[in-house]
Structures are given as structure tokens and as C-alpha cells.
Image (cartoon, rainbow, N blue to C red):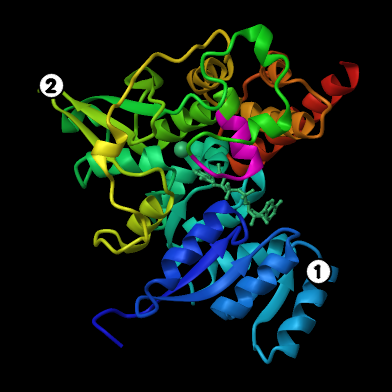
Amino acid sequence: SGPFRQQGVTVLGATGSIGTSTLDVVARHPERYRVHALTAHRSREALLAQCLRHRPSLAVLDEEHDAAWLRERLAGAGLATEVRAGEAALVEVASAAEADVVMAAIVGAAGLLPTLAAVRAGKRVLLANKEALVMSGALFMDAVARHGATLLPIDSEHNAIYQCLPPEHRGGLSRHGVTQLLLTASGGPFRGWSSERLATVTPAQACAHPNWSMGRKISVDSATLMNKGLELIEACWLFDARPEQIQVVVHPQSVIHSMAAYSDGSVLAQLGNPDMRTPIAYGLAWPERIAAGVEALDLFRVARLDFEAPDEVAFPCLRLAREAMQAGGTAPAVLNGANEVAVDAFLAGRLSFPGIGELVAEVLEALPVEAGGDLETILGADARARQAARERLQGR
Ligand code: NAD
Ligand code: MG
């Protein structure tokens, strides 16, 4: 069986863009990894295909009637996979003893409880679900430390920064001579567009990202730059940074995935083709390196690397996120909850593209910032933000 003990892998959000890429990397290394559990929300056909291919011990869907459908087909195919339904089952598979590694790739606040469960069970947690950390920052990082979890960032920017920092970088960046984190951004599909032109943007346009193929929610977030705002908050928590220590740099080629600047003038960068299998493979194998199926970077084909400042007037979401982080307490959870409602409304054709930032700003202004980062306070703030956003949508 080779030099390694085979690791059990659970993929939360297996049918999504990150989940699919994770299974692609895992399947390249059958001697290292065995799939323990796969979860999806509603996409039962996709989960069925993944179960037939990867033969997990467990599969989870949101609703019992979908679970029953899957159970019947898997039994028919002679598989012993156990199929469960609902959030309690998600939390259980995230903390199951058979899982050494948990990929947190559910989109949005729905991923918070299962991701936290994996952290509290002391797993190696591969964090793609940035919304979970944005909402619960201090509580989340505290649980990582308290339960001895190994947290590896999968978001390509944070994975890049992680690779550019010294191995033991907890306890403040300045202790390690780091002066600034340079968070790169593609600028999204509407880079350079005026506010007037942005008012005409359709969901189909927003979901067509120039460099990355991703789920619909993060595609819209990339287009509004809210994604970069969420990533700024994510970086503050992951690397003990203050918002002022993070500079967002628009870099349209998406070849430099982010950088760390040091007091001696050195700037370390991580480069690669824009393919999420690179950070996923890094997280799976850290501190070792494994093949990810990613094409080698051809710098002659890249030819040039461009940089520019973000336009925070036409794209206010980045500024809103920075301000929410500076406000602290429940402000990031409010920002995130309002944004999730706004993005859904935009995708459903009920809100204009600039309306997303406007709605988030209104909700942030309306709700007071609460201190105290316990789970109840965070979930309460999330629920109030969603409620406030829905009320304002009705009134628009
Ligand atoms: P996606 O929409 O493609 O997939 C989401 C997955 O989560 C699916 O398996 C879906 O079934 C499941 N899911 C959705 N809602 C759920 C719910 N309410 N309960 C349980 N499961 C649910 O999304 P994605 O692009 O793979 O992104 C996943 C996460 O990774 C997001 O937080 C995103 O910000 C982050 N991320 C994605 C990329 C990327 O390249 N796609 C890059 C960096 C970070
Ligand atoms: Mg990213």
C-alpha cells in the first residue's frame, strides 16, 4: 500500500466547482486517498455519478426524498454507500472519525456549521467556503487553535500567501518581518466599466468570468469585487493581519495568485495557471507536494503581467467589506448575509447589478454592530441581515 497511511477524505459540496476539482485530484492518488463521504444540496444526479465513480462510505443530500432516490439507485448498482439527509447528517460526516481531511466547499453561510464541526473535530480542514470564516472569524480561528485542527486555505490568493509566509506565521505578521499582503484580483468581467454601463449587466454576463470557471454565487461576487472584499476579511483572520496591511492589486492575467512583502524589500509571489487543482493539491498533501493535473506555467505564453488599482467607486463592495472588518463584531456576518440575499435577487432578475452593493450598504447602515462573537450572536446577525435585505428588496 505504499509509504503512506491512506487518508479518508470528506468533500462537503462535492458536486460544485471546487468539489469536482477536489475529486479530480484525489482520484489521481488512490494510494494516498480514499473518499469517505460526499455531500450535495439538491444535485442528486451529479452526486449519483460521483458515488458510482468514487464509492464513498456515505453520501448526504439536503432532502429525504432525494436521499431515498439516491439510496435506491446505489443499492441497485450494488454499492454499500449509506445515504443520509439534512444538516445534522452534514455536521456528522464533517466530524466522522473516518475522515482525516475535510474539504469545506459548500457555498455561503450554509457551510458554517459543518465546517465548524470539522474544525472542532480537529481535522485537516481545506477551507474553500470563505463565507464561513468571514461570518465567524474570531470564533473560527479560536476553534482551530483549541481543537488542534490544521487549517489550509484553498482560496487561491490565501493559498498563495500561505506559501509565501514562513511556516510558523501565527501571532502577527510584523513578528515575521512581513509588512504587507498583496491580494491580487482579476478585476472580474467588468473591469474598466463605468457605473452607467454596469447598470445594464445581466446574470449571464456576470457568470462568465474571464479566467476562472466557478459556481454562480462566487462568479457574481467576483464581478462586484465583493469576492475580493470577502477575501480581504478572510486574509485578516487567516494571517492575523489588519485591513490596512492588505493591499488589493488588480492583475488581469491571474497568474500571480498573491504576494507577501517583507521589511527588507523582498516581495514573494506564488505563480501558476489559474486552476484550483493547484491549491487543492497543496492543501491535500501539505507539507508535501503531489501532482494536480495542472498544465505547467508557460511564461512565454503569458508574456506580460499587468497591475492596476481597483476602482472602488464603480465597485463599492470592496470598500464595504473593508469597513465591515474595521467595524468588527457582527458587521462581517451582516455584510455576508445581505450579500447572499442580494446575489440571489440579482440572479433571479429582481435586482440590478449596482443594486447589490446598494442593498448591502443599506443593510450595514441599518443594523447596529454587535460585539461578542459567540455562535448565537453570529447566526442572529446573519438572520437579521437577511430579513432586512428581503424587506428592502420588497420596497425597491
Ligand atoms: P458551487 O455552487 O459550484 O458548489 C457549491 C456546492 O455546495 C455544491 O455541491 C452544492 O450542492 C453545495 N451546496 C449549495 N448550497 C448548499 C446548502 N444550502 N447546503 C448544503 N450544500 C449546499 O460553488 P463553488 O464555486 O464550488 O464554491 C464553493 C465555495 O468555494 C464557495 O464558498 C466559494 O466562495 C469558494 N471558492 C470557490 C472557488 C472556485 O474557483 N469555484 C475559488 C475560491 C473559493
Ligand atoms: Mg479567490
Q: Which residue is mark 1?
A: 66
Residue 19: image x %, image y %? 55, 58
Cβ–Cβ below 8 Å for labels 2 and 1?
no
Q: Amino acid at mark 1?
A: Asp
Toward which corner of the image does residue 268 lie, by quadrant?
top left
Of residues 101 and 175, the one nearer the viewer is 101
- Packing grade of label 2 (10 A; few <14, some 14-19, many >=20) is few
Write the start and end of the magenta stretch as one range. Answer: 212-222
Q: Is residue 77 above or below residue 237?
A: below
Q: Residue furthest left?
A: 264
Q: Which mark is residue 171?
A: none
Q: Is residue 56 visible?
A: no
Secondary structure character of the magenta stretch overall:
helix
Q: CA distance from mark 2 to mark 1?
A: 56 Å
- Name the quadrant containing residue 34: bottom left
Left/right placement of residue 328 relative to residue 68 reads left
Q: Quadrant of residue 94?
A: bottom right
Q: What residue is drawn where x is 53% and y is 27%?
A: 188
Position in image of residue 151 (x %, y %) = 39, 52
Mark toward the start of the polypeptide (2 vs 1): 1
**Dot 2 corresponds to which residue?**
265
* Residue 353 screen position, x and y as percent: 70, 21
